[in-house]
Amino acid sequence: MGMWLGWTAILRWTMCSTIRYTGMDNIRTHFTIAVAAAGCFLTVCWSAFLSHGECFWIESTTFFWLAIYTVKKHQDSLTVASIAMALCLGRIVPELPVRVFEFSSSVGSIPVTLSCIVAIILGCFCTKRNFQTLPVVISLIALFAVNTFNIHFLTEWLYEALH
């Protein structure tokens, strides 16, 4: 019984330290981060009109650096996981109406969304180690690999699946 109580105490402590919920200020900060991500998406969504591969690079690198900036700015008051979730929500929510009402015509841009989410996670990974050189290089190499995979394989697979 004592072991069980010890694990529940550890679980309770980790959940409380992960959430760090202290009131309206954190909710307001999360909302501000999500709105900033939505605004960032709306400023770079024009890149879909360029050649197919360029929209991957423009949007993913923008969200990569936005994640780094946001975590550096708010890491004292929020957890990295909550910042990443707010950034992902801000990236996904503006395109939900298109995804819901015109899903068949918006399937081709799903790899771009996945690439942006991976870029946000990699940007948050960089700041986890106090922005040292090695995590940044590893994250940029991983982002390059994800974008290359999305451009060459996932998009072609989606195109063949739909036609």
Image: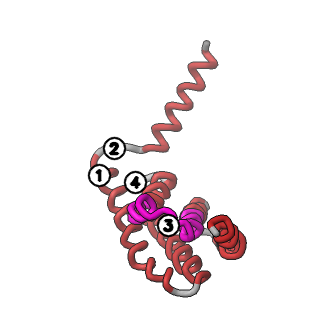
Spatial CA distance of label 1 from label 2 is 7 Å
Q: CA distance from mark 2 to mark 3?
A: 23 Å
**Is the Cβ of the residue at disc 4 closer than 8 Å to that at disc 3?**
no
Q: Are marks 3 and 1 in contact (CB under 8 Å)?
A: no
Task: Decide which of 116, 156 is in the foreground and name it.
Answer: 156
**Amino acid carrying mark 3 in the image:** Ala
In-image side of 3 versus 35 (left or right): right
Q: Please say whether residue 72 is visible from this viewpoint.
A: yes
What is the C-alpha distance between the residues marked 2 and 4?
A: 10 Å
Q: Which residue is mark 4?
A: 77
The tag earlier along the polypeptide, 4 or 3, is 3
Principal secondary structure, stretch drawn in magenta: helix
| Amino acid bearing label 1 | Asp
What residue is shown with label 2? 22
Residue at left offset 38%, top offset 62%: 97
Residue, far left: 24
Image quadrant holding the C terminus, namely bottom right
Earlier residue among tags 3 and 1:
1
The image quadrant that residue 76 belongs to is bottom left
Label 2: state its secondary structure: loop
> What residue would you read off at disc 1?
25
The residue singled out by tag 3 in the image is 67
Could you say where residue 127 lies in the image, as x and y percent from the top left? 56, 64
User: Which of disc 3 and disc 2 is earlier in sequence?
Assistant: 2
In the depicted view, which residue is nearer to us: 144 or 79? Answer: 144
Q: Give the mark nearer the N terminus: 4 vs 1.
A: 1
Q: Is residue 70 magenta?
A: no
Q: Residue at x 55, y 76 (%)?
A: 61
Look at the image and give the residue range highlighted in magenta: 92-120
